[in-house]
Amino acid sequence: MQTNVINIPVSIHFVNDLNITKSGERLTPWLTEREIRDVVLPEVNRIWKPAGIVWNLNTVDVAKTATSKSEGVARYLEGAARGEDGGSNPELVRNLLSIVPSTDDKVKSIHVCVLPFIGSTLQGLAIPKRQVAFVGQWTDKPSQGRRAPIRCKVIEDGAFVQGSFSRTLAHELGHLLSLQHPDRAVRQPDSLMGGGRPGNALTQQEIDMARKAALKLYPQTELKIATPLDYQVVQRNQRGKGTVTISGAITAALLEEKHTLEVRRDGGDWKRTPVRWGNATFTAQLELQAGGWYALDVRFVGPQGVVAAASVAHVGVGDVFVVAGQSNSANHGEERQRVQSGKVVTFDGSKWQLANDPQPGASGDMGSFMPPLGDALVARFGVPIGFIACGIGASSVREWLPDGSTFPNPPTIESRVRRLPDGSWESKGEAYAMFISRMSDVGKNGFRAVLWHQGESDANQADTSRTLAGNLYQKYLTQLIQQSRKDIGWNAPWFVAQASYHIPGDEGSDDIRKAQAAVWKDRIALQGPNSDAVKGLFRDSGGKGVHFSGPGLREHAARWFEKIAPWLAKQ
Ligand SMILES: [Zn+2]
């Protein structure tokens, strides 16, 4: 999930010039700006994190109240208490509002006045209409006003006996975002907004209400991240690193040069990152070690603080494989496979998702070998694995050739080829165009290898005039590999499997198998698994079918792993 964080600027005003004495105790201000910055706001942000709301310090000042006024307010607060019904006291509100400093707001912000004391049995008070909160540094709430006020704790130490300054502030900020004390009848335990046992929890309903109010009161500068996508795997390079492109759209205000981009990984330190600006867009590069999932937070910072922020929860640097061929490279296995590691994903051209079968982009809606292969690679190499599945059931290598490539005899299925006047045939190039487009989606060197599993529809066809001769299979597959490398602009490695098995009694074509092996021997491709040997109960329909059973898919995956893993270890 990409969560849009809502940023709310907070202006803090220390009102230190109120000389309040209560029960013989002089209530001197003791909280420092540094504690607000380093302890209080981080704690408030920790409490509000589940709501995706971040309170950013806008300004801190020490308010100067007119002496005549401060004397009157101080005397009033020495005797003040909650309203009769335990609710608000209009006279108290009037007095407190009279000391709010007038500010010349460059940025619309919430105002928090930090007072020595705000009245007997009170710790905080919020006035939503004015978007201002008052919090006291001294309180007699723990003794219900029976003893002299004591210093509030800065943060809770877990006991919730007293109620800390930070928790009080977090609670009052909730009021400023329209939240009220919950009904006694429906009170949740450990609730920030009130309840039998105080705590820091916000209900989903409170989160929804607070976010809605926050967006209305504090319109956010919009930042939409286009890349990386959630669950994206970026191909690692030979140095064991991957370059993640951070790009997106922003509203015009952010285009000013003084806004800087900061990125952090897994909640660590923010790092200033160079940006290339486009027309309401931006691009930046971030190098990450192979691994993941990483959580990335992205924000723009201006002179007033954070102006826009967004996050991507899962970004990985690992290995990406393009899988192509016919049904046994697609979703035609008897049993859908599921990812066990949580780190195998699949890309449909616009979004990444966990690679539970069926794989988007490939034909069929049942099982494939990709989830177990991916899990085995995750276990061996400790990096996330991505798949781009392109397989088309029953397709011949002839149908995968670029538009206009000719051959003497047609495949069994004619929808992706056309007959020429001279009696020969040519590919319409649809599968090829799709294949190039899918490979290009991840850019140059954007995947580790192509896994090619195809040949059954060229071997031993029922109508023998549709069978492709081995020498032509070798020629066309070589043409496909070499032309596709030209068209994607880099020499992608290919693995070619041996695949020609149909059913018991028709268990392979030496001609096609030799052709597939010849492509390895020519060093055009690397040797893939011998999947013709995966038969018996590894095939569907109790061993009678051409597709794999559940155990067969896992065996097929294990054989791919045997070929890929030793090669990958050397990269
Ligand atoms: Zn309250």
Image: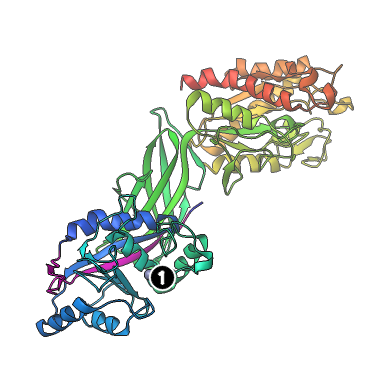
Outermost residue toward the left in this view: 67
Which residue shows up at 23% across the image and 57% down it?
37
Q: Residues within 10 Å of mark 1 (few under 14, many from 20)?
A: many
**Residue 101 lies in magenta, yes or no?**
no
Instruction: Assign a secondary structure to mark 1.
Output: loop
In the drawing, does residue 193 fall left or right of residue 441?
left
Which residue shows up at 30% across the image and 69% down it?
124
What is the quadrant of residue 423 in the picture? Answer: top right
| Quadrant containing ligand 1 | bottom left
Q: Which residues are magenta?
A: 3-29
**Residue 11 lies in magenta, yes or no?**
yes
Which residue shows up at 82% across the image and 33% down it?
410
Tell me the amino acid under the disc marked 1.
Leu
Percent of width and height locating residue 293 = 46, 39
For disc 1, the marked residue is: 177
In the drawing, does residue 529 fall left or right of residue 197?
right
Percent of width and height locating residue 282 = 39, 56
Figure check: 295 above or below 2: above
